[in-house]
Amino acid sequence: MGLVDRARNIIVTPRTEWPMIAAEGGTVGDIYRNYVVPLALIPAVCGFIGMSVLGFSMGEGHMRMPFFSGLVMAALQFGLGLLIVYLVALVIDALAPSFGGRKGMLPAFKLAAYSYTPAWLTGVFLLVPVLGFLAILGLYGIYLLYVGAPRLMGVAESKAGLFTAIVVIIALVMSFILSLVIASLMPMPAMM
């Protein structure tokens, strides 16, 4: 299945798409190459364009991140985005047996990768920095994780909510730590 069809289906019809994903073969590398990398580029590229090329108004001036700094930030955001998906998959794989599920890195990675779809797609709002708040729509991925956990990891339906909550809390902590890393390496925008 193609990237666009998969992204649309996982968002629009997740209850029918998860069983199809579960039945597919492949490797973690295949999913990275054909799905995660192209989608993870969206927030990185859009954020770069929004902050370094277009800039944003603040008070009486127009701010823009220096071009090279913006490139470095985009590369860091992209790389850490790839890393967080793998780390979340490790968490999913480790926690599943505690919730009546089974271990398996490939299904855990599928669950993590496809659940991140809304977060990556909402990265397009970073083109216009004042619309960045609309990235909150990416929280739909929590629902995708909840629906997918029983289908991919065999998590008991009655425990899927708690499983999802714990995975999300751990993912938020990891994301916060990684965002601190990015922020510490990121220069301030320049006044134009």
Image (cartoon, helix red, strand yellow):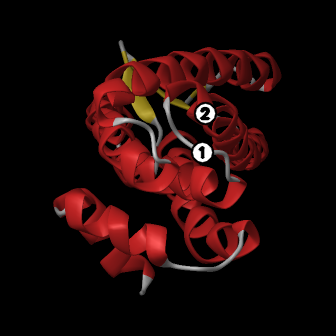
Left or right: residue 50 compared with residue 110 = left
For the C terminus, the quadrant is: top right
Residue type at mark 2: give it.
Answer: Pro
> Can residue 117 be seen in this snapshot?
yes
Q: Nearer the viewer, residue 41 or 54?
A: 41
Residue at 50% of width from left, 58% of height from top?
42
Residue 162's disc is none
Residue 97's disc is 2
At label 1, counting other C-alpha atoms closer than 10 Å, the crowd grade (few under 14, some 14-19, many 20 or more) is many
Q: Is residue 127 above or below residue 20?
A: above
Question: Which quadrant of the figure has residue 76?
Answer: top right
Left or right: residue 46 compared with residue 9 = right
> Can residue 127 be seen in this snapshot?
no
Residue at 42% of width from left, 86% of height from top?
2
Residue lying at the far bottom in this picture: please name it: 1
Left or right: residue 32 compared with residue 51 = right
Q: Is residue 189 above or below residue 124?
A: above
* Residue 151 coordinates in the image, percent (x, y): 38, 54
Residue at 18% of width from left, 63% of height from top?
13
Question: Which quadrant of the figure has residue 66?
Answer: top right
At label 2, counting other C-alpha atoms closer than 10 Å, the crowd grade (few under 14, some 14-19, many 20 or more) is some
Q: Nearer the viewer, residue 74 or 62?
A: 74
* Residue 116 coordinates in the image, percent (x, y): 46, 47
* Residue 22 coordinates in the image, percent (x, y): 46, 67
Determine the secondary structure under disc 2: helix
Residue lying at the far front in this picture: please name it: 100
Residue at 58% of width from left, 58% of height from top?
107
Q: Earlier in the sequence, mark 2 or mark 1?
A: 2
Q: Are marks 2 and 1 in contact (CB under 8 Å)?
A: yes
Q: Is residue 70 above or below residue 62?
A: below
Numbered circles on residues, count: 2
Residue 102's disc is 1
